[in-house]
Image (cartoon, grey):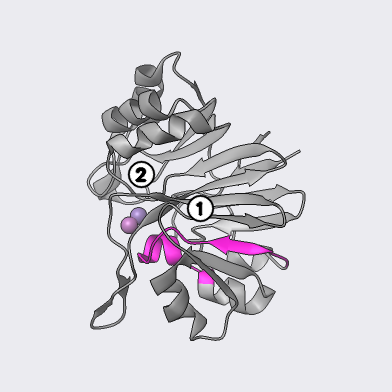
Amino acid sequence: MVRVQYLGHAAVYIQGEGIQALIDPFLSGNPQAGASSGDYQKLSHIFVTHGHGDHLGDALELATRTGATLVSNFELCTLLGNQGIATHAMHIGGTFRFPFGKVKMTPALHGSGVMTEDQVLYGGVAAGFLIEVEGKKIYHAGDTGLTLDMQLLREESIDLAFLPIGGNFVMDTHDAARSVDLIRPRKVVPMHYDTFPVIQADPQEFLREVGSMAEVRILAPGEAVEL
Ligand code: NI
Ligand code: MN
C-alpha cells in the first residue's frame, strides 16, 4: 500500500515499498505546514520541482541530515550537489528506473530561479514528477500554468494527481479543472492555495468544476490518501 500525505502548499510525503520521500519540502516558514522538518529522521529521496523557496524549502537541510538523494533538474542538482548532498539529476521528458519504481520528469510552465540575498541563481527549468510506486502512478505538477502538454499524461492512467489551483503564479481553479479534463487522473488533490494572500482560492469551486471527471480529494495539511 502506498500512503501519500499532503503537508500543505506543494509539500507531499510518499511512503511505500522502497521509498520514503518528500516532494517540495517547504516546511519551515510554511504557515500551512502539516509537519516539521525535524519529524523526518529517515528519507530515501527528496524531489524538488523547481528552485523557488516555497518548493526548495528545507530540502538542503533534510538531505544533509538524512542522507536522502535529492532528485531535481540538472542545474539545481549541480548547485545543491556543491553543498555536499547526494543528488540524482534528471531533465524534462527523462525517465529513470529507481529501485522503488520509475520516475519521469514532466514539463511545467514556470520559472526555477534560486533566490540568494541579493541575486537570482539560474536553477534550470521548472518541472513536475510522475512517480510510480508499487505500480501506482502519482503525478505532482509542481508550479505550472495550464498547458496542452498535459494531454500527454492522459495515457499514463494516473492514480493520484496533485495540481496547483491558487492562481497568480500557477493555474487558478478554472484552469486546474481544465487540466483535469486533459489528464483524467482517478483522484486529484488541489494544492498551492491559501498559503499567501495572493494565492487565495476556493477548492470547492475546483471540486464543482471537475464534477465527474475525477474524484476530488480536498486534503487538510497532514491528511493522506492511500493507494
Ligand atoms: Ni514557483
Ligand atoms: Mn510555488
Q: Which residues are magenta?
A: 42-59
The furthest residue to the top: 212
- Residue designated by label 1: 11
Q: With respect to residue 85, does 49 lie above or below? A: above
- Image coordinates of residue 227 in percent, x first then y, are 68, 33
Side (left or right) of 212 relative to 18: left
Q: Marks 2 and 1, how far apart in space?
A: 14 Å
Quarter of the rendering occupied by the N terminus: top right
Side (left or right) of 113 relative to 84: left
- Image coordinates of residue 182 in percent, x first then y, are 37, 27
**Mark 2 or 1, which is nearer the eye?**
1
In the picture, residue 46 is in which quadrant? bottom right
Task: Check residue 45 for magenta coloring.
Answer: yes
**Residue at screen point 28% across, 38% down:** 146
Side (left or right) of 196 relative to 40: left
Describe the element under mark 1 as helix, strand or loop.
loop
- Residue designated by label 2: 194
